[in-house]
Image (cartoon, rainbow, N blue to C red):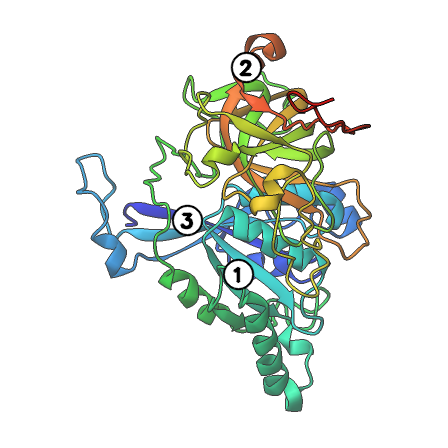
Amino acid sequence: MAGRRVNVNVGVLGHIDSGKTALARALSTTASTAAFDKQPQSRERGITLDLGFSCFCVPLPARLRSALPAPDAAAEPGEPLLQVTLVDCPGHASLIRTIIGGAQIIDLMLLVIDVTKGMQTQSAECLVIGQIACQRLVVVLNKTDLLAEDKRQAAIEKMTRKMRKTLENTKFRGAPIVPVAAKPGGPDAPESEAPQGISELIEVVKKVKSMQSFHTPVTAATQGDRLGICVTQFDPKLLERGLACSPGTLHTVHAALVSVEKIPYFRGPLQTKAKFHVTVGHDTVMGRVMFFGPAPDGADGEAAPDAFDFSREYLFQEQYLCKDPAPAGTGGDTGDTKAGPAAEGGCPRQQWALLEFERPVTCPRRCLVIGSRLDADVHASACRLAFHGVLLHGLEDRGYAETCLPSLKVFKMKHRHGVVERVASAPSPGGS
């Protein structure tokens, strides 16, 4: 009999038609009602439109068993299992807000690459999202069966080298790269064709450490669990997506003070008063931004990373200050720092922003914030993700401009310039 389960959420992300859903199907032993593009709209269009959930279980590695708490009397008997919940994300560029929402619940990301095409536009955006939202990455080179058999191994090794070079300057340097064929022969091939490389991929996922773990008995659920709830006399059309939470953990805010860091692959400056699509928790809303940094006399001081200090003074910025140019070939900014007096002495270590939302947002404290330009051309090769940060302080009062903002000490540096029209020497004492 199966015992306790330690759950880990694994996101399956990548460019459209890279084979993400086929990979999730090949890995999974149990599917939910939202798995494998079961929605009629997804089947009609032939693409994933929303998050899909499925799972498989493997014996819990020995090194993780020691971290489990002692079982109580209500615990299920049997060997503990590692339950891998797969979160299949859309790959179409127009659905990036759904991808961002899915990324916020994952512990590990599978970046699926079509081995015949390599990195594509949404592959790169998914990699950027992964750097923001999770700590572990496994690259899956899919569709290896489409490579000529006599050149297959050489092509896989070449793409592996390219991917290692791509990951070289990211926090995923040295991440595992696994070649697979999730659906040999393509989507119309008979189901008798067995997937290739799946067992090797499962072994890689089992080796990843430091995952969020929790018990999953049928009588209880914790953060991150995939949970089905039967609610009688309820019209499902009234609810698109919701959040189950403990009382007091979610707050509705009209504006927020956030720590902010520019994504180097975003092309162009981040201007104060500009509008962005801001993803807060699992919601995306339009918001106007105002950037500010530490006062010049305190530029080297470190602020508390988990809270906003209203007692300090801050310097207004016309735009986010950045010194280093984006990596070559990424289409990033040019490193312009002409944004105010602070630029003359170098860029501050920390910068913040006031985000004012067009409608209220319900979110937990210290949630992830991502600013994007989702109105940009989806077919362009430029990165649409502009900045990310952490919500440090939410302004819950609708009249925050009068009640809260006066306590925010943001000032501007002003200079006065004059012209001397005439210089006259004072007469010396006793002179004529």
Q: Look at 38% across and 33% down and name the residue there.
A: 221
Point out the frontmost of discs 2 and 3. Answer: 2
Query: Marks 3 and 1, how far apart in space?
Result: 23 Å
Residue pointed to by mark 2: 396
Q: How many marks?
A: 3
Residue name at image x 49 percent, y 46 percent? 106
Mark 2 vs 3, N-terminal side: 3
Q: Earlier in the sequence, mark 3 or mark 1?
A: 3
Tag 3, which secondary structure? strand
Quarter of the image that includes the C terminus: top right
Q: Which of 94 and 121 is in front in this view?
A: 121
Q: Which of 21 and 291 is in front in this view?
A: 291
- Residue 203 coordinates in the image, percent (x, y): 40, 67
The residue beneath circle 3 is 8
Q: Is mark 1 on a helix, strand or loop?
A: loop
Q: Nearest the camera: 391 or 415?
A: 415
Alpha carbons under labels 2 and 1: distance apart:
36 Å
- Front-lying residue, 305 or 19: 305
Answer yes or no: is residue 20 visible.
Answer: yes
In the image, residue 359 lies at what x, y percent? 68, 20
Q: Residue 183 occupies which quadrant of the picture? A: bottom right
Q: In the rendering, which numbered label is found on residue 170? A: 1
The reply, left or right, for residue 312 in relation to residue 12 is left
Task: Tell whether label 1 touches label 2 (CB within 8 Å).
Answer: no
**Label 2 amino acid?**
Glu
**Mark closer to the chain start, 2 or 1:** 1
